[in-house]
């Protein structure tokens, strides 16, 4: 069976280092690994509209931002198909048929939907499109027969819901020869990358909380954000013992620090474990650790920023790439939709057997 990647992001803002640690960095590695037959990367504008129906301009404006962020991180249109969700109308058709395979109570139990409803204060007036977006996300994944979905930890319930839909579809409509493919989530390698906290130590990076470091932030902006990051409120003097739990600077180090960074930027410590021990023992100041993190982040972000500068010079070319990608994606989705409709036997005009049978019934 071919190995196919599909994943994507909602275009509601520029992408930040949480996206990078959680999934983007991994996607680029997977794309370049040569192990996958196809890689599809989707800008999920239709899904973004499910909770931004009052602000379509935001979604529209951010499509190019996400595309620039993707390509500056190394997603390469020669190797991956980059496309825009709304341009693939087949996804809506698939969604409509999958809706019959999911109950309202199952959607209500989806933990991601549940917490998002709370976050947005939707309790009393949940848009139906928002409520059902896990079904549309299952269409996104299955339309490309994706086997592998690299995502952050918060998306796990979506993949689980998708697998259930696939299972129900195949057992109902294609028991002998499965039509849809059950995808696997590919989660970040470590806990820190699963859900990178905001610079203020709050659970999640989010634009509305103003606690994000964006991939496209200028270097001095990144330094400023790092120097004002939340650490350990009890660590008042350098000599005090410090705590690691909830200490954002150390969480970021867990996500971004590589062994070679010590040689380069912190030669008086051997590795991250030793640095943590020193901090806990006392005698290691926050400023020193923050400067170290700053060096690492600049090293990580410099090439991304440089590539973005280049890409920004030819914006029409980026839209052209998305247009071409959408055409390619559309063909793949159309094939799946055709398979789905055949399995459901709503391909009436190709069903010569049925036409003949109906004909005989009336003309025996
Ligand atoms: N829900 C994802 C997010 O919020 C975006 C998304 C839409 C997605 N469809 C997808 C991710 C399919 C993986 C697979 O970022």
Image (cartoon, grey):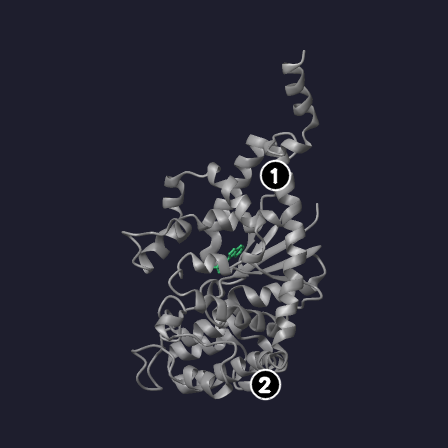
Residue placed most toward the observer, 289 or 220? 220
Residue denoted by label 1: 340
Q: Quadrant of residue 149?
A: bottom right
Instruction: Give neighbour class at mark 2: few <14, some 14-19, many 20+ (Cα, 10 Å).
Output: few
Q: Mark 2 or 1 closer to N-term?
A: 2
**Whether the residue under disc 1 has CB within 8 Å of ligand 1:** no
Q: Quadrant of residue 340?
A: top right
Label 1's element? helix
Residue denoted by label 2: 264
In this orientation, does residue 164 appear?
Answer: no
Quarter of the image where the C terminus is located:
top right
| Residue at the image point whose x is 37% and y is 45% from the top | 109
In this orientation, does residue 286 appear?
Answer: yes
Quarter of the image where the N terminus is located:
top right
Nearer the viewer's eye, disc 2 or disc 1?
1
Residue placed most toward the observer, 5 or 64? 64
Q: Which mark is residue 355?
A: none
The Cα atoms of the two marked residues, 2 and 1, are separated by 55 Å
Residue placed most toward the observer, 107 or 3? 107
| Residue at the image point whose x is 63% and y is 31% from the top | 348
Image location (x, y in percent) of residue 311: 62, 78
| Residue at the image point whose x is 41% and y is 38% from the top | 103
Image location (x, y in percent) of residue 226: 43, 82
């Amino acid at each position: 069976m071919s190995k196919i990647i599909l994943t994507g992001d909602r275009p509601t803002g520029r992408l930040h280092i949480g996206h990078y640690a959680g999934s983007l960095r991994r996607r680029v590695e997977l794309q370049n690994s040569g192990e996958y037959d196809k890689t599809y990367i989707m800008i999920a504008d239709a899904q973004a509209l499910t909770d931004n129906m009052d602000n379509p301009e935001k979604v529209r404006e951010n499509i190019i931002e996400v595309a620039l962020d993707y390509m500056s991180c190394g997603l390469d249109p020669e190797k991956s198909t980059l496309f825009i969700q709304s341009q693939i109308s087949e996804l809506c058709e698939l969604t409509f048929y999958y809706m019959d395979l999911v109950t309202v109570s199952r959607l209500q139990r989806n933990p991601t939907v549940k917490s998002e409803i709370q976050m947005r204060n939707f309790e009393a007036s949940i848009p139906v499109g928002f409520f059902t977006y896990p079904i549309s996300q299952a269409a996104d994944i299955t339309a490309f027969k994706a086997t592998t979905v690299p995502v952050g930890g918060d998306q796990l319930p979506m993949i689980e819901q998708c697998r259930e839909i696939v299972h129900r579809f195949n057992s109902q409509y294609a028991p002998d020869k499965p039509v849809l493919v059950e995808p696997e989530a590919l989660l970040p390698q470590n806990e820190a990358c699963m859900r990178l906290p905001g610079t203020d130590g709050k659970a999640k990076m989010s634009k509305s909380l103003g606690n994000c470091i964006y991939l496209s932030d200028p270097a001095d902006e990144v330094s400023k954000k790092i120097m004002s990051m939340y650490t350990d409120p009890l660590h008042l003097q350098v000599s005090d013992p410090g705590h690691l739990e909830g200490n954002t600077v150390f969480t970021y180090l867990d996500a971004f620090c590589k062994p070679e960074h010590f040689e380069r930027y912190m030669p008086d410590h051997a590795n991250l474990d030793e640095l943590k021990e020193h901090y806990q023992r006392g005698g290691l100041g926050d400023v020193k650790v923050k400067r170290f993190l700053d060096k690492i982040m600049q090293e990580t972000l410099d090439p991304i920023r440089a590539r973005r500068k280049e890409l920004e010079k030819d914006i029409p070319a980026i839209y052209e790439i998305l247009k071409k990608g959408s055409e390619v994606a559309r063909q793949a989705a159309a094939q799946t939709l055709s398979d789905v409709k055949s399995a459901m036997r709503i391909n009436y005009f190709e069903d010569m057997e049925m036409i003949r049978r109906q004909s005989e019934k009336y003309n025996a």
